[in-house]
Amino acid sequence: AKDCSLSRLLTVIRGVLRDETHLPPALLTGVLRELTAARKHRTESERLVESLTPREREVLRCMVAGLGRKAVAERLYLSPHTVRTHMQNVLGKLGVHSTLAAVALARRAGVGPVDLTGDDLAGDVVERGGQLA
């Protein structure tokens, strides 16, 4: 602050030189409020993602990877109509109105994209022609 004493200024400078962080109390309150709000949003996002079925989570991971409906259908051996239904269910359960918003919420919850190389399919249960493979 402009009105701080020379000794206080020197104390802060010495602290910064020791890799300490200095925040005035007024700013610290705002920073803590933002961190708390960010954690609350992440927790809420995680709870919403956990409400999805395993198939809906897989569809969401495909959405995070940027795959469109047709590509998701091919990857998961589903019809495009079924994928559209899953995508609509994902949007509804997450309480969002667009794929972009769903992807943002998923990333906030720590959901990563599906592996586009196909290496992550080994452990997946994949539906093929109405039967589980």
Image (cartoon, rainbow, N blue to C red):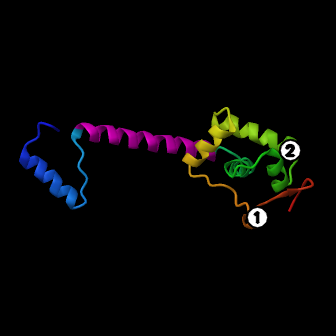
Task: Inspect the image, locate mark 2, and give the three-letter code of the amino acid beneath it.
Answer: Pro
Q: Is residue 125 above or below residue 7?
A: below
Closer to the chain start, of discs 1 and 2, is: 2
> Can you tell which quarter of the image residue 91 is in?
top right
The residue under label 1 is 118
Residue 113 percent across, percent down from the top left: 66, 55
Residue 39 percent across, percent down from the top left: 45, 44
For the point 62% across and 55% down, which residue is it? 112
**Gap in angstroms between the C-alphas marked 1 and 2:** 19 Å
Q: Magenta segment, which residues?
A: 26-50
Nearest to the observer: residue 3 or residue 40: 3
Q: Is residue 27 magenta?
A: yes
Residue 67 percent across, percent down from the top left: 75, 49
For the point 22% across and 42% down, which residue is it? 24
Nearest to the observer: residue 78 or residue 101: 101
- In the picture, which quadrant includes the N terminus? top left
Task: Inspect the image, locate mark 1, and give the three-letter code of the amino acid beneath it.
Answer: Gly
Residue 123 percent across, percent down from the top left: 74, 65
The residue under label 2 is 80
